[in-house]
Image: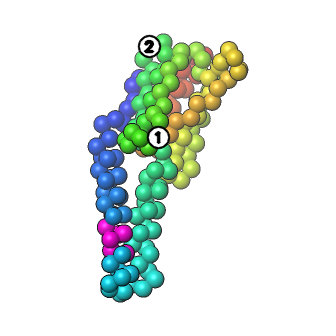
Amino acid sequence: MRLSNRNKASAYNFIHTLLLMFLIAGAGAFILEEYKFDILGWESIFLITVPILFLGIFYLSGRQIFEYDSDGEALHFRNRNIIPFLSKPLSDEFPKYKLVSYEIINIFFIKRLYIKISSKNSGSIMLKYEISFLTKKEVNDLKASLNKVVKSN
C-alpha cells in the first residue's frame, strides 16, 4: 500500500507564505501604530504576537510531507518539510519482518507515529515520524496497513 500527501505541498506552501505575509504586515502595522498613529494602545502587540503564534503552531506540528510504501518485501517511510533548510528529511527503509510494533500519539493538533523495529546490535530501535498533516482517513489506512504487517510477523 502506498500513502502520500505530497500532492498537498502547494497548499502547505501557500499557507506558509500567507502566514509570513501576515507577520510582515503585522510588524509594519505595529511599527506604524507605535511611532505614528497610537490608536490601539497596548493592544498593538497583538499585531505581531498572533501571526507569530500561528507560525509557531504551523512549525511545531511537524514535517508536512509524509510518504509510506509497503509494497514488496520492505517498508519505506519518508518524512520531509516543505522548506528544505528548516529540518533534515527522514527516510528509512527496512524489511517487513523487522517491524515489532507501532504507536500513534495524538496530542491536540500534533500526531506522531512511533515505529519499533528489531535490530541485531541494540535489540530494538524506535523511529519517530510526524503525521500531523495526514487526514483521518489516511491515518486509518496507515493503521490498517501496519496492523496487517505486525500480524503477519
Does 97 sit above or below residue 58? above
Does 35 sit above or below residue 125? below
Which residue appears farthest toward the front when viewing the image?
A: 35
Q: How dense is the environment of label 1, judged by Cα within 10 Å: few (below 14), some, or many (20 and up)? A: few
Q: Which residue is mark 1?
A: 87
Q: Which residue is mark 2?
A: 72
* Residue in the picture at 45% in, 33% down: 89
* Residue in the picture at 40% in, 64% down: 51
Q: Is 69 in the magenta?
A: no
Left/right placement of residue 44 relative to residue 151 reads left
Q: How many marks?
A: 2
Q: Which mark is residue 3?
A: none
**Element class at badge 2:** loop
Towards the viewer: 89 or 114: 89
| Mark earlier in primary sequence (1, 2) | 2
* Residue in the picture at 38% in, 32% down: 4
- Distance from Cα at disc 1 to Cα at disc 2: 29 Å
Towards the viewer: 27 or 136: 27
The kind of residue tagged 1 is Ser
Does 133 sit above or below residue 129? below
Looking at the picture, how far across and down is residue 49, in whole percent? 45, 68
- Does the rendering let one see residue 142? no
The kind of residue tagged 2 is Gly
* Residue in the picture at 47% in, 56% down: 56
- Does the rendering let one see residue 61? yes
Looking at the picture, how far across and down is residue 21, in whole percent? 31, 60
Type of colouring: rainbow
In the rendered image, which quarter contains the N terminus? Answer: top left
Residue bounds of the magenta highlight:
25-30
Looking at the picture, how far across and down is residue 149, in whole percent? 54, 20
